[in-house]
């Protein structure tokens, strides 16, 4: 990393599903509790207390707290996702493991990894990018992403960018930021080092994929724009909303599905099973 590289601890959103599930897996492998989704006790108490406030006040609090994590779009060229991958890998206890999971986020998988006492390395992470705008104008969010994404993609040639704009489930956050969900296209060097160093001889590598697809607008070879997301309206309902760009392709769902990794090369041969 150069001196101008952003701190990897502040690149990825703390509310990112992959980051939280990864932290929970690390806690399980370290045999410690994971209260308040990894937040401090003080923050946990504050969240519960805030839940008693009137919704208009609570809305403003949630928006400002979440928006405080965004990064300046001018800094996207300073994002080093290789350093983020290293942070994920280095978080696990340094010992031999009988298996490892790599790929999509999944709550049930986190419980399985905890029970088996094996690591999970995520493929998708969320970068929150500062943007003030109308949540009901995904077309404007698309134009914004088209302008600022090249810096991130040029600095990280081994990732794909799935820009996600959910005007229904994430209305509060999309008024303050744009969700850049990035997926590694190749096995990060830090992951390869982790496998070669801490995976037991002959142990399997399981690639986790939930196979979700979503209609997208393709903005480049490694950049797509997704309106909506799983858990709310259907893709067709999102596309029917005013100002929603019409899809011209489909792709792995931004938050949950993994992409096929182009190469999985590391020091030790694999003799175990695979989940495709």
Image (cartoon, rainbow, N blue to C red):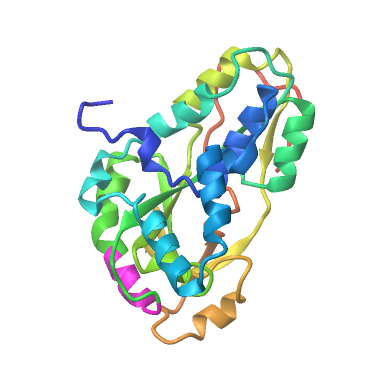
Seen in the picture, residue 21 relative to 15 is either above or below; the reply is above
Task: Tell me where the magenta segment starts and ends, as one range.
Answer: 136-144
Q: Is residue 140 magenta?
A: yes
Q: Position of residue 91 (x, y in %)?
A: 53, 24
Seen in the picture, residue 176 relative to 18 is either above or below; the reply is below
Nearer to us in this view, 232 or 81? 232
Residue located at (43% from left, 69% from top): 57
Magenta-colored segment: predominant secondary structure:
helix
Based on the displayed image, in which of its 4 quarters is residue 221 positioned?
Answer: bottom left
Residue located at (58% from left, 16% from top): 196
Seen in the picture, residue 235 relative to 40 is either above or below; the reply is below
**Residue 220 seen in render:** no
**Residue 15 seen in render:** yes
Nearer to us in this view, 234 or 272? 234
Is residue 166 found left or right of 156 in the rendered image?
right
Residue located at (70% from left, 14% from top): 200
Based on the displayed image, in which of its 4 quarters is residue 119 positioned?
Answer: top right
């Amino acid at each position: 990393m150069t001196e101008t590289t952003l701190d990897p601890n502040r690149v990825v959103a703390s509310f990112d599903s992959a980051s939280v599930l990864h932290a929970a897996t690390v806690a399980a492998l370290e045999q410690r509790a994971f209260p308040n989704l990894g937040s401090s006790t003080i923050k946990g108490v504050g969240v519960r207390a805030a839940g008693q406030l009137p919704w208009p006040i609570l809305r403003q609090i949630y928006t400002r707290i979440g928006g405080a994590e965004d990064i300046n779009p001018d800094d996207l060229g300073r994002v080093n996702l290789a350093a983020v991958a290293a942070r994920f890998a280095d978080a696990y206890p340094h010992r031999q493991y009988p298996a490892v999971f790599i790929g999509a986020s999944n709550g049930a998988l986190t419980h399985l990894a905890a029970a088996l006492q094996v690591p999970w390395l995520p493929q998708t992470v969320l970068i929150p990018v500062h943007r003030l705008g109308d949540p009901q104008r995904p077309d404007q969010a698309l134009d914004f992403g088209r302008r600022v994404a090249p810096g991130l993609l040029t600095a990280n040639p081994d990732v794909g960018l799935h820009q996600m704009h959910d005007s229904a489930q994430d209305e509060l956050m999309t008024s303050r930021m744009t969700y850049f969900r990035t997926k590694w296209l190749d096995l990060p060097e830090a992951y390869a080092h982790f496998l070669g160093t801490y995976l037991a001889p002959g142990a399997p590598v399981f690639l986790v994929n939930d196979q979700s697809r979503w209609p997208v607008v393709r903005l480049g070879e490694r950049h797509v724009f997704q309106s909506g997301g799983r858990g709310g309206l259907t893709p067709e309902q999102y596309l029917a909303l005013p100002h929603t760009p019409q899809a011209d392709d489909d792709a792995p769902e931004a938050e949950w599905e993994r992409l096929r990794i182009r190469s999985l090369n590391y020091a030790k041969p694999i003799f175990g099973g695979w989940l495709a």
